[in-house]
Structure formats: structure tokens, C-alpha cells
């Protein structure tokens, strides 16, 4: 049954469209090391793969146990085995190519590098698979040595397919996964040929990686690219031999939680024997940007401007800027502030992707590198390496990181070892993650801790296509967690870890779930947020019987913990109609297309988040309930549904609810709501009653509206109502006739029950929309003030599409240092196409139509009261890491209210504009903003101009700030020609007066 659920889950993935705000990594490092070490564990020993070379960089073929020294967690270990593995040994050679979500120029670089890899890697005894990363890890080609198939898969995965392939792009992603599921299920390939044991094992590992990727996104609230890498690292233990993952990365910025995720990836890779080779695909890489910042800090702006410059063509520049704003490229704050860059930021910075490669025995490659030598060396390393084994000196599996050091004892040897692994139980299939270890230890002890209060429950949903489905719900009030306030960024942060497992009657764990929840929120809304909940929900299928739920929560900020055990039964299904358990609804959130297609709490395009505490705050306008109706498909009678609300065992409302016809699987998800603002505090019960023929089924739920009991509150004596169809949004009056006046002379409002429209997340009310806009406006107008003084590298890649058909040609790359000091931006050009330059933007043939200021100016244009911006709610969305919801608003600023000018040479026109803003529900911060100019005159040289800016949390000196990470500017000329600037902001560093670098005279 569980396997069927897994297959159904993956099949559901195949047909889904993946939506993700793009981001990425890039940076340069020194030449990659020749040697590598991989770590694999089982119950009794650790196996380390070593590549050992001599001083001439030639492989060593006579290594002996006495030639190396290994320490594990600082303790010297004795080798139990050492053997040389060569190409003749028959070992597997597996390479996996993974493409990040890439911008056009980076995608082309990635495609070209992958093509070179195919030429250098010999087809004999080497198998290659191809993935890319969107909303999840997606398979484009399973392990094969077929170069034609691999070439086609690389084209599709990198977005470089030709026009013929583009027509079948969806099939390029869906068909390999569909074939993979069939192969695992039947043991035959798409042609019906029986698979060998080796081929079937490879397919099982690929399927496990796809499943694990989606699970990690849900459990650890991380970006899909990080989840994909962790999934490949964790499932690599299912494969034997040398395992290389080559990740083609877009530039990416990390907050403090994402940096922890990279450590987890390295630890998992070391346990599974996976080495990462990371490829920076951008023309100007991050390490070079870091070196540019160092040059600026040590030599100053004046020194940079004195450097020899590369010649540049002349021409007219184009600019789009706020009226009255200084022209782009001014260097007002440069020389006076660059000597205050924090020293640690220059000397201590390490590229995260380069670190991942180094810690896993791989290498870091940039697009500008000569690739032949490092790739040939990778092939040599896979063909000749040592395996050494030892018994690990682990006293307890506490989830802590254990560093492993491999040092040569023989003169002239070069050995590069991995950083280490996490002390987790040796059963690699258990799925235990480092953050779970302390929580599992709590569950194994007595008594269970109770310092942190939370609620847990099992919702029994009945027979669904995936089986007898149930949903586990664990919720903890934010008020129970310690929050850390940052007045500088006007944000608070919290971090909770949750583990839950289901045990059968004999004590065997049949389901294991976990979630690591980092979260940011606005200090302005902290008081309101403290009444909100953090919820983990997972669904599982189980046979009827007796079970135990165990759940534990750890506050990562103060180590406060709580744990619970709950016994529950899953009953035998009876014949006839039935109802699932009824649950209160905390909220309905958008359901991304890439999530589990078998989600039982799906309600149209939304997902129900339950509330299991049974507590409703006094004055709540609405109380919603969710349940699943299971009509008897064998009965000719039409089922009827009725809802009753009781207080003190007396009915105060009773109303029939219309049922639509059941779907193909026979069940109907139902969501009903009570307009409850007039209900007095007290204990209530809602009863759902399903009748079909002579059979009647009931399910009830009790809840309490909190607040002082009102002695004068009246209870209506009767209830009735008209039937309205499910999926209609109008109200159902639950009370008929005039109301009895309250004792204080006021009339009570009628109790109203509403059935919510299926297939949609309810839009915000007018008041709620005003509150969303007000919160975003406050954050936007205060945004500049919340930022620290910093310096960063601004790297621009310019391309042109002459015919407007998507055929982009690279024009040039520009590297600048951007300083932000006392709320002022300034830029200094350092390089053009990799050569030193002191030219300003105005001196270059520069298309810079939308440089209105990503650090607050653009936000001010949209949210300033003088703009009189018209906002409309468009849709709800989710953040890429799954940590929260987005409210997507469309906006328009009329020309007469606009403060935006388009400048072309000596011509300048004022324009109106429109676009979208993506507002983070937790922080009220804008996570993406788009802008398109309106009303361009026919005789103007520009026919269209647009800009998009993406914001994400970036760690600067240990604090997370919401900062621009990527910007795209497009300009259409001559009706067809489109010019595009792709701008990346990297290497954010803070000014610090306490640590100065003296200027060199």
C-alpha cells in the first residue's frame, strides 16, 4: 500500500508546472585539488575513499596502512582494511548532472560546459544521469552512456532545446519520470525489455532521490535546489562505486539557516560517498567579486580608478530614474567609507559552493576556467582510488558533527580528506536528519519533557485512492517559542524543530515525520503573530488497528522542549456512507502544483491547515470546519448533508448543505464556515450528519470561544435555513424569523453558515487588503532606513535578442562595487569583460533603462502616497522554501501621478507604470516586484521597458537582512530588438568602524 502511495505521489508530480522565484550561486576559487575522500557508514565501520597522489601529481599505487593517519572526532582510529580500486575492478562510475534554475546567459554556459563533460568522460564504464531543479528535483535522463540521449536531456534540462524540442518540453521532463516509475514497478524498461539487477537498482536510487527531494522541501523549508542536493547526497548510499554530482549553480545568497543546510548536505554526502563538483555558470563569478571588494578596500576608490582601463565603445546611454534622482554611476560616498569595510568579511569569507565541493572531496569550477584538466583529473580519480575502513569511536548517536582528518605519514603524498559526517544511527534507510537526533533522544527517555506546550492529533479521513488515509497534525503557539528581535532590520526570528512518529501495537515505527521551521516576522506585527501557530501536518495510510503517536518539539533558540504520546485507533470501514473526522480550519493556503498530488486535505487549489487546539479567540468573525464526505457509491439514493451547531447541548443552528456529485474516487472534500462574530464565549459543538437511504452517519467536534462569559447573551430558540449549493460563495441564513432582543436591549445578529467555494483560496476582504497594503507600504517606505551600511559586488551581464525570438547573444559583462552608506547608493566600475576599467556608466555604450534603485527607490515609487497607486489582489502564492505565503497584488500608477522618467539621450518623458508586488505575509516585506512602463509615444526610441527585482534574506555579520539578490531589466527597441541586463548582487559586507583597513598611499 505504501509503495502505491509513493508511486501515485510521483506520478502526480510529473504533470505539474513548477514555479519558483529564481536564485543561484556563483563564485571562483583556486584550482581544484586532485584528491578526494568519501565516507560511507554501516553498523560496524566507516569506509573512506581516498585519492592519493605524489608530488608530481601522479596516482600512488603502493599505499600501505602505515602511510596514512585517520582521526574521527579527534580520536585516532585503527584501519581494518585498505585496498586499491581501479578501472579493472569493475566498480561503478556514476556521474549526475544537476542544473539549477538558470538565467539565459548562465544556462548557455552550463549547457556548453556539460557538452564538454560528455566529450571528456569516456562512455565505457561511465554512466551519467541528468536532473534539473525547479519546484523539486526533476529527472530528464536516467543513468546511461548513450551520448545522443544525454545530449538531448542536457538541452532540455538547461533550457537550451531547439524549436522542435521546445514543443515537447513537458514530455522531456514527464516521460523519463513516468518510465522510471514503471521500471521500478514492473522491472522492465519502456520497450518491455527485462532490466538487470544493476539497472533496477539504479532506477530505485533515482526514484528515491526524487521522492526524498520533495520530502525535504516540505520538512526543512529549504530552497528546492538545496533539497535536491541533499536528496542526492542522502540516497547516494543506495549506489556502489564512485559517485559524482556536478551541480551547475546560479548565484545564490544564503541566510544563516541556508548555511546550516549546506553543512547538512556535506555531512550526508560524506556518509553516502558522494562528491560534489560545483560549477559557477555566470560570466563574472563570485570569488572574483570578492577579490574586487578587497581591491577596493585596500586600494580605495581612487586606486581603482587609477587602474588601467579596457577600451569601450562609445554610444548613447539610456536611463530610467526617479525625477530629481542623481544619475546612475555617481560615486559620492566611495573613498571616504571604503576603508571601513569589516575586515573579517574580506579575509574570512569562503564561497559556500566551493566549501561544499572541498568538504565532499570534489572541486569548484567557474565558466571561465579551462575545463579539460580538472575534468580529466576527475575521470582519473574515479578510475583509481583507495578504500580504507575503520570502526568509528562513536559513543552515542547524538546527531553532532564528527570531523574526519586524513593525513599522510609518508613523505611526498598529497591526500585531501572530507570535513566529516553527522553521528546518526547507521541505518541509512531510517531517514534520520541531524536536527532530529536530540528529539528522538527525548522520546526514548522518561518522563517526557513538558516545558514547551503544544497540541497533537490524528485526523482519520477514511478510504481515499491512496488507501485508508489519516493526517497527523502537530501545532505549537508562537507564544511558546523564544523570538529574537533585530531592531536594525525590524524583524524577529524563531526556529523550531519537530519530530513525530507512528508506532503500531507492537511498538514498531511505521511512519516517521520531521520538520525544521526557521521563520522571520515583522516586529510591527509581532503582537498579532504571537497568537498564531506553527503547524506540521503529514498524511499516511495505515490498516485498521491500535497505534501510538509520539511527538516532540525543540525550541532551537533556548533548547526548551516538549513531548507527548497519544494512543489512537483506526477503525474498520463499515459499509454504506461515512464521514471523516471534523477539524477546525486555521487557514487555507495556496497549494503549489508541485506538491504531493495525494494530499487528502486538498480543497480545490488550496490546502487546509487544521487547528486542533479547539480554542477560538473571542470576536473571531468566522469559524471554518473541514471534513470529507464518503457517499455509498452502490446506493441509488441521493445522500444529504446537514450541519448543526449546539451550545450547552441546545441547537442554535441547523441547516442542510448541498452535496455535489462525488468525484471518481467517491469522496467529497467539504469546507463550511460559521459567521460567528456575535457568538458569546463558551463551549460549542458542531455536528455533521450524512444520510443516504436508511443509513445515517454523524461526526462531531467540540470547541470553545474564549473570553468572559456574558450573562446577558441570548440563545436563539430555533434554527432553519435554505439549501445553497457547495461551491457557491453566498451565505446560508441559519436562523429564521425575528431575533429576541438581548437583556441589554440590543438585538443579536443572526448566526450564518457559509459553504466556501471549492477550488479557490478565499481572497482577502477589503479591510484585509487595506491592511496588507498598509503593512507593505510601511515596510517599503522604511526600507532604506532599515539597511546597514554595506558594500557589495554588482555584476551585470548584458545580452541582446535582435529579432525578438528568444535567441539571446551575449554582449558584455560589467563588474561594479556598490556602496550603501547613510541611505545613499554609489557605484564604481572595476571591470568590463574581465579587464580592469575605470569608466562610468555614462561613458559606456550602456543600456540601463531601469536603474531606479533596488535598495528602496523602486519601492518608494510604488508605495509613496503621492503615487496614488491602485492595488488589486491577484492571487496567493507560496515562498520557494515553503516557509510562508505570499499575497500577490497587481498595481497601477497613472502618468499624472508617476515620478518616473524615461531618458534617452537628451529626450526625457514621464510615464505611468504597472506591475505586480509579491508581499511576504509574515514580514510584510516585498519579495518580488515587477514594473512595466505605460504609454510610450510612437516616436520614442523605446517601445517597451520593464524591470523585475527579487529580494531574499542575506546574512550580513550574523544578521539576516531582506536585500536585492537579482534584477532583470529589459528594453525593446525597433519593434523587435530586445536588450536585457541581468544583474546580480553578491558578497554583501558591512562597514564596521571597529575594524578598519588602512588605505595604501
Image (spheres, rainbow, N blue to C red):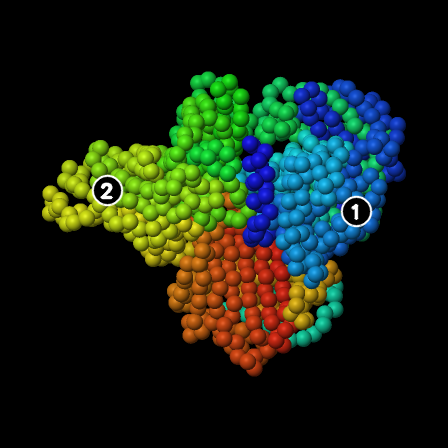
Residue 540 sits above or below residue 566 on the image: below
What residue is shown at x 40% (from left), y 65% (from top)? Answer: 870
Q: Which mark is residue 653?
A: 2
Residue 456 spot, x, y in % from top left: 41, 30
Left or right: residue 798 compared with residue 520: right
- State how far apart marks 1 and 2 are (Cα): 68 Å
Q: Residues within 10 Å of mark 2 (few under 14, many from 20)?
A: many
Residue 525 is tagged as none
* Residue placed under numbered mark 1 in the picture: 146
- Image quarter in which the C terminus is found: bottom right
x, y percent for residue 545:
46, 23
Q: Residue at x 42, y 52 (%)?
A: 760
In the displayed structure, would residue 321 be above or below residue 592? below
Few, some or many C-alpha atoms within 10 Å of disc 1 (few <14, some 14-19, many ≥20)?
few
In the drawing, does residue 208 fall left or right of residue 109? Answer: left
Dot 2: element: strand
Q: Which residue is depicted at the point 59% across and 64% down?
A: 969
Q: Locate residue 488 relative to residue 110 in the image: left or right.
A: left
Amino acid at each position: 500500500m505504501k509503495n502505491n502511495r509513493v508511486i501515485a505521489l510521483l506520478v502526480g508530480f510529473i504533470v505539474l508546472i513548477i514555479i519558483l522565484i529564481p536564485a543561484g550561486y556563483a563564485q571562483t576559487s583556486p584550482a581544484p585539488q586532485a584528491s578526494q575522500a568519501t565516507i560511507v557508514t554501516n553498523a560496524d565501520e566507516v569506509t573512506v575513499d581516498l585519492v592519493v597522489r605524489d608530488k608530481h601529481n601522479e596516482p600512488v599505487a603502493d599505499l600501505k596502512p602505515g602511510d596514512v593517519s585517520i582521526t574521527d572526532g579527534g580520536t585516532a582510529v585503527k584501519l581494518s582494511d585498505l585496498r586499491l580500486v581501479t578501472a579493472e575492478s569493475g566498480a561503478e562510475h556514476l556521474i549526475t548532472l544537476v542544473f539549477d534554475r538558470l538565467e539565459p546567459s548562465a544556462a548557455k554556459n552550463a549547457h556548453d560546459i556539460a557538452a564538454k563533460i560528455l566529450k571528456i568522460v569516456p562512455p565505457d564504464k561511465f554512466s551519467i544521469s541528468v536532473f534539473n531543479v525547479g519546484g523539486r528535483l526533476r529527472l530528464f535522463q536516467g543513468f546511461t552512456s548513450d551520448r545522443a540521449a544525454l545530449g538531448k536531456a542536457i538541452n532540455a534540462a538547461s533550457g537550451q532545446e531547439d524549436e522542435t524540442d521546445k514543443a515537447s518540453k513537458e514530455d522531456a521532463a514527464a516521460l523519463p519520470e513516468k518510465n522510471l516509475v514503471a521500471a521500478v514497478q514492473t522491472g522492465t524498461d519502456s520497450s518491455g525489455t527485462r532490466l538487470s539487477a544493476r539497472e533496477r537498482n539504479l532506477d530505485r536510487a533515482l526514484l528515491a532521490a526524487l521522492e526524498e527531494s520533495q520530502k525535504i522541501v516540505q520538512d526543512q523549508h529549504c530552497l528546492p535546489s538545496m533539497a535536491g542536493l541533499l536528496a542526492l547526497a542522502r540516497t547516494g548510499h543506495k549506489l556502489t562505486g564512485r559517485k559524482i554530482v556536478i551541480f551547475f549553480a546560479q548565484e545564490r545568497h544564503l541566510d544563516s539557516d541556508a548555511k546550516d543546510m549546506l553543512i547538512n548536505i556535506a555531512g550526508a554526502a560524506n556518509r553516502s560517498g558522494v562528491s560534489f563538483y560545483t560549477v559557477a555558470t555566470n560570466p563574472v563569478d563570485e570569488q572574483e567579486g570578492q577579490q574586487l571588494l578587497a581591491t577596493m578596500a585596500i586600494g580605495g576608490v581612487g586606486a581603482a580608478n587609477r587602474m588601467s582601463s579596457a577600451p569601450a565603445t562609445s554610444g548613447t546611454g539610456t536611463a530610467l530614474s526617479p525625477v530629481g534622482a542623481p544619475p546612475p554611476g555617481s560615486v559620492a560616498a566611495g573613498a571616504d567609507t571604503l576603508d571601513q569595510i569589516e575586515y573579517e568579511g574580506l579575509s574570512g569569507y569562503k564561497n559556500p559552493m566551493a566549501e561544499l565541493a572541498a568538504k565532499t572531496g570534489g572541486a569548484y569550477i567557474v565558466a571561465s576556467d579551462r575545463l579539460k584538466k580538472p575534468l580529466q583529473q576527475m575521470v582519473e580519480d574515479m578510475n583509481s582510488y583507495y578504500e580504507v575502513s575503520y570502526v568509528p569511536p562513536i559513543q552515542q548517536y547524538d546527531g553532532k558533527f564528527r570531523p574526519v582528518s586524513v593525513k599522510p605519514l609518508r613523505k611526498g603524498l598529497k591526500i585531501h580528506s572530507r570535513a566529516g559526517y553527522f553521528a546518526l544511527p547507521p541505518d541509512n534507510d531510517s531517514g534520520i536528519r541531524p536536527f532530529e537526533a536530540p528529539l528522538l533522544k527525548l522520546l526514548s527517555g522518561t518522563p517526557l519533557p513538558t516545558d514547551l506546550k503544544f497540541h497533537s492529533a490524528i485526523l482519520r479521513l477514511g478510504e481515499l485512492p491512496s488507501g485508508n488515509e489519516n493526517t497527523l497534525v502537530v501545532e505549537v503557539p508562537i507564544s511558546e517559542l523564544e523570538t529574537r528581535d533585530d531592531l536594525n532590520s525590524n524583524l524577529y526570528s524563531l526556529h523550531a524543530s519537530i519530530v513525530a512518529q507512528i508506532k503500531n501495537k507492537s511498538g514498531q515505527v511505521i511512519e516517521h515525520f520531521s520538520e525544521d521551521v526557521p521563520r522571520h516576522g515583522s516586529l510591527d506585527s509581532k503582537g498579532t503573530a504571537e497568537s498564531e501557530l506553527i503547524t506540521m501536518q503529514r498524511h499516511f495510510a495505515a490498516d485498521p488497528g491500535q497505534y501510538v503517536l509520539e511527538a516532540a518539539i525543540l525550541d532551537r533558540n533556548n533548547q526548551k522542549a516538549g513531548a507527548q504520546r497519544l494512543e489512537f485507533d483506526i477503525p474498520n470501514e463499515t459499509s454504506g456512507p461515512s464521514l471523516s473526522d471534523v477539524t477546525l480550519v486555521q487557514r487555507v493556503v495556496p497549494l503549489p502544483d508541485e506538491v504531493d498530488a495525494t494530499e487528502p486535505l486538498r480543497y480545490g487549489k488550496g490546502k487546509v491547515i487544521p487547528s486542533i487546539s479547539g480554542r477560538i479567540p473571542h470576536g473571531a468573525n468566522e469559524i471554518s470546519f473541514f471534513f470529507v464526505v464518503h457517499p455509498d457509491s452502490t446506493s441509488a439514493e441521493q445522500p444529504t448533508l446537514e450541519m448543526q451547531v449546539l451550545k450547552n447541548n441546545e441547537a442554535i443552528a441547523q441547516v442542510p448543505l448541498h452535496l455535489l456529485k462525488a468525484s471518481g474516487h467517491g469522496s467529497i472534500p467539504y469546507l463550511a464556515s460559521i459567521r460567528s462574530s456575535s457568538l458569546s464565549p463558551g463551549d460549542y459543538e458542531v455536528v455533521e450528519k450524512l444520510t443516504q437511504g436508511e443509513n445515517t452517519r454523524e461526526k462531531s467536534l467540540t470547541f470553545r470561544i474564549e473570553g468572559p462569559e456574558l450573562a446577558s447573551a441570548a440563545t436563539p430558540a430555533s434554527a432553519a435555513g435554505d439549501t445553497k449549493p457547495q461551491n457557491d460563495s453566498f451565505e446560508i441564513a441559519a436562523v429564521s424569523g425575528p431575533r429576541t432582543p438581548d437583556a441589554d436591549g440590543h438585538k443579536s445578529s443572526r448566526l450564518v453558515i457559509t459553504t466556501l467555494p471549492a477550488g479557490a483560496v478565499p481572497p482577502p476582504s477589503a479591510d484585509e487588503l487595506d491592511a496588507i497594503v498598509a503593512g507593505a507600504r510601511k515596510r517599503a517606505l522604511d526600507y532604506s532606513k532599515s539597511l546597514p551600511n554595506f558594500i557589495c559586488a554588482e555584476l551585470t551581464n548584458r545580452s541582446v535578442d535582435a529579432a525578438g525570438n528568444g535567441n539571446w547573444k551575449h554582449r558584455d559583462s560589467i563588474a561594479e562595487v556598490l556602496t550603501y552608506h547613510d541611505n545613499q547608493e554609489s557605484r564604481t566600475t572595476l571591470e568590463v569583460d574581465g579587464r580592469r576599467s575605470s569608466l562610468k556608466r555614462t561613458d559606456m555604450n550602456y543600456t540601463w533603462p531601469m536603474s531606479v534603485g533596488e535598495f528602496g527607490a523602486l519601492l518608494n515609487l510604488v508605495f509613496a502616497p503621492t503615487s496614488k497607486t491602485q492595488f488589486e489582489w491577484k492571487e496567493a502564492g507560496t515562498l520557494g522554501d515553503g516557509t510562508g505565503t505570499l499575497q500577490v497584488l497587481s498595481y497601477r500608477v497613472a502618468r499624472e501621478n508617476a515620478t518616473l522618467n524615461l531618458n534617452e539621450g537628451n529626450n526625457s518623458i514621464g510615464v505611468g507604470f504597472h506591475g505586480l508586488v509579491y508581499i511576504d505575509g509574515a514580514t510584510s516585506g516585498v519579495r518580488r516586484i515587477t514594473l512595466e512602463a505605460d504609454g510610450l509615444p510612437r516616436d520614442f526610441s523605446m517601445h517597451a521597458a520593464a524591470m523585475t527585482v527579487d529580494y531574499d534574506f542575506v546574512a550580513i555579520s550574523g544578521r539576516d537582512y531582506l536585500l536585492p539578490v537579482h534584477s532583470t531589466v529589459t528594453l525593446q527597441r525597433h519593434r523587435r530588438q530586445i536588450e536585457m541586463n541581468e544583474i546580480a548582487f553578491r558578497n554583501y559586507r558591512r562597514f564596521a568602524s571597529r575594524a578598519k583597513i588602512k588605505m595604501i598611499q
